[in-house]
Image: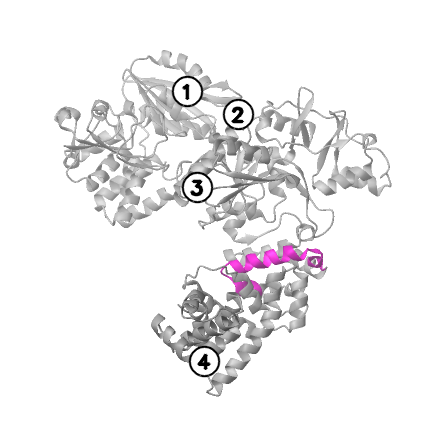
Amino acid sequence: MEVISAHLNADFDAFGSMLAASKLYPEATLVFAGGQGRGLQEFCRKNPGLAERFKNPGDINLDEITRLILVDVRRKSRIGPFAQVAERPGVDIHIFDHHEASGADDLHGSQEHIAAVGAAVTIFARLFEERRIRPTPEEATLMMIGLHEDTNDLLSSSTTADDCRAAAFLLSCGAELNTVGDFLAPEFTVEKVQLLHQMIRTLRFIPVHEVEVAIAQASARNYVGDLAELTHKLRDMKNLDALIVAARLAGRVFLVGRSRIPEVPMDRIMGEFGGGGHAFAASASVRDLTLIQVLDRLPSVLEKHVRHSCVAADIMSSPVKSIAATLTIGQARELFNRYNVNAMPVLREGTVIGIVTRHLMDKAFYHGLEEALVTDYMDAEFATVPPDTPVKVLQEMLLERNQRFFPIVENGELVGALTRTDLLRQLIFGQRTSGEKPAENLERRRQLARQLRSQLSADRMELLEAIGSVGDEMGVNVLVVGGFVRDLLLRQENFDIDIVVDGDGIAFAERFREHHPECRVRAHAKFHTAVLIFPDDSKVDVASARWEYYLSPGALPQVEYASIKNDLYRRDFTINTLAISLNRRDFGELLDFFGGQRDLRDKVIRVLHNLSFVEDPTRIFRAIRLEQRLGFRIGQNTEALLKSAVRAGFIDKVAGIRLLNELIIIFRQGEVVQTLRRMAALDVLRFLHPALTLTQTVIDLFDEVFKVLNWYELLFLQEPFQRWVVLLLCLTSGLDDKSVGELCERLNVVRAERRCLTECRTELHKVVRQLKWQCGEGRVPLPSQLFEQLRSFPPELLVYGMALLSDGEARQLFSQCIAKWRFVTPELTGHDLKAMGYTPGENFQRILKALLDARLDGWVKNRAEEIDFVKKMFI
């Protein structure tokens, strides 16, 4: 027997999900695990025909159950008599649930459909769409009621995009919204008004770890429905972050909890009383305790489950750049420019003695005080705070003292710093810096964790989790950053994993190797970075969180340890500053200090500061490349800054090898011609060579080159081949030999590739011109004749030469050379010739060359014919 059931005290979500499950399991029996909510009871009373489809546990023989399908629940303690069935060996369990895991109480099945969505019916709506199942209008309406009830009309913080898509699907199936409104709109009876009045009158607050949890109580002789709706109303009336209502109704105690903040997880709190739900909405029905006993127990339960609110250590930046008390104002001003910060503490022998700001240093410099000591003009009246200071206290200090910079001091040592911006961001968005409010942040973490699992292979996901575990072991924050995160959010493939460690990246890599001895570590001490190299040659870049500053435009950066926020600030564009935490406690949390998510949504490339292209002019190439690859646009201000850097000629200061690397990356992506067009429009190509232009002839040649490259790659030839060389040959096809040599000199092209781009290119052009003339005159050369001219050219030049030929016959000859002639060899060897009586020496070379020519020209086709050929030609 197959049975479909849900949790005790079933609501409309459970009811609608059971009906939906019956479409997937048409032979199954619908059985309530226990009672139903008052609203569902009223619905069943008014629809007896539908209610008859549902049975109670006493109506069936539990021993006959072979498959148990659970919807809207997976906790064993929430399914009543079916808990014993689930534990029985041989019972097949299928689970459809949207609640968070609760630990040991959770059941597991042979099939599990678990999703962090607002309602269980959303899971079924998604399955119906995938399998092209359409519920009837009546079934769609009942599912819609469950969806609206569990998501508070799609307004709850637990509502996801999938819930909205489910609503659209159900509406398309004929769901009646008028019916949904009739059943969910609360009827405000006299009893409900009296109950709400009691709740308002008894409202009190319990402070737990600097978080205030509101508690209200009420009693009624008879059962009054919609206690959850009354709890919602009280929460909204009083604008409460966390509210628990305890009510004794008809001799039984009911608990309803609502929370807007992640510090108060209502599902765990209600779980202590045998209930459950979501972190932001949960309930419980208490059997064995009185109302007074429940209220007495609540403080200890809250103490156990309410998490500490955010403290200074959670959001501070560390390590902190500081100014020595012995420095002058001129020297301090130089440090402000180097590190691009607005305030720094002044230290004497490790002790914070004051605070100075960039604005103060600039004004002092303007007044000619550059030789004065910073201690003469620093702010010596300031407050330091310990790491465990609640952020709420700091926010109050911000308002009362107007202090914009807070040194975080522990045991007399400076361990971190907080700025006014940090505190304002925390005040608006909540803990950390995801740019989202707490409820949204928690849901976003779940979504990102799911997205990681869905987009990455199991091996890659296991690798990220292993990296996070090593971070936990070392007590350091570990994040995956940059292009990997950007492309994850854009749902594009990117296998380049970049890790930032809030500490020593090299030490982290070495610790990881201890746990995974199959990998190797290549460290770069100068830049505080390391590379993890795995047996399949895949790599993971590991870097310490660090500052980078430039001593001159175009120079390589100088590196120092810094905080995660400072590390992200040094990056090129806002969309590359996004980071995802890999530590277990906040796996999937997205850090966005600089509006990267906004720019992803707006499809804009923006720099983080106005000197970005001056400090590193190669960012000009990266901006253009990303714009074309992602289909974005360079922001107006960013484009103006780019053009200014181009006009100033800063690209001339960049080492040639760095320019070549940027060009190679452009050649590797799919939008080569569009990128080159944009470079030409922004006057960037001239920095490769003053005579380099992108004419229509060159663009047409690129079209031909890509056709030939696609053909060549389909040959699957196992030989070294550098695609970028072909494309650089194409780009420089309009330059004379002297200019190409100068371009190779500017880009520091190594000798082998330089020869290919210069000397060999010149010779190839001669061969191509001659072949065009021969084919045009009807004097097509023999394969052996053409091969003799082409045999010394590398495959890159042959592909380029084939693209240069528009004539069908000439191009066909080149294709034969690339695909066949280069791999033709005579079957006879020198040993064979010796056995035939020929004397070794130069004669052997003449014979073997003649054999090869005969093979190419089709005169001989096998070993026997080769022997006859040699005997006739070399008597």
- Return the residue nearer the eye: 561 or 623: 561
Identify the residue under disc 1.
216
Identify the residue under disc 3.
460
Q: Earlier in the sequence, mark 3 or mark 4?
A: 3
Q: Is 316 positioned to the left or the right of 814 in the image? A: right
The reply to whether the C-beta atoms of the residues labelled 1 and 2 are less than 8 Å apart is no
- Return the residue nearer the eye: 125 or 408: 408
Q: Earlier in the sequence, mark 2 or mark 4?
A: 2
Q: Secondary structure at mark 2?
A: loop
Amino acid of disc 2: Ser
The residue that appears at 39% across and 41% down in the rendered structure is 458
Amino acid of disc 1: Ala
Query: Is residue 725 highlighted in magenta?
Result: no
Q: Earlier in the sequence, mark 4 or mark 1?
A: 1
Disc 1/disc 2 C-alpha distance (Å)? 22 Å
Disc assigned to residue 309: 2
Residue count near mark 3 (Cα–Cα under 10 Å), binned few <14, some 14–19, many ≥20: some
* Residue 315 visible in rendering: yes
Q: Earlier in the sequence, mark 1 or mark 2?
A: 1
Q: Earlier in the sequence, mark 3 or mark 1?
A: 1
* Residue 689 visible in rendering: no
Identify the residue under disc 4.
782
For the magenta stretch, what is the residue range? 649-676
Q: Earlier in the sequence, mark 2 or mark 3?
A: 2
Disc 3/disc 1 C-alpha distance (Å)? 48 Å
Q: Is 7 positioned to the left or the right of 550 in the image? A: left
Q: Position of residue 738 (x, y in %)?
A: 67, 71
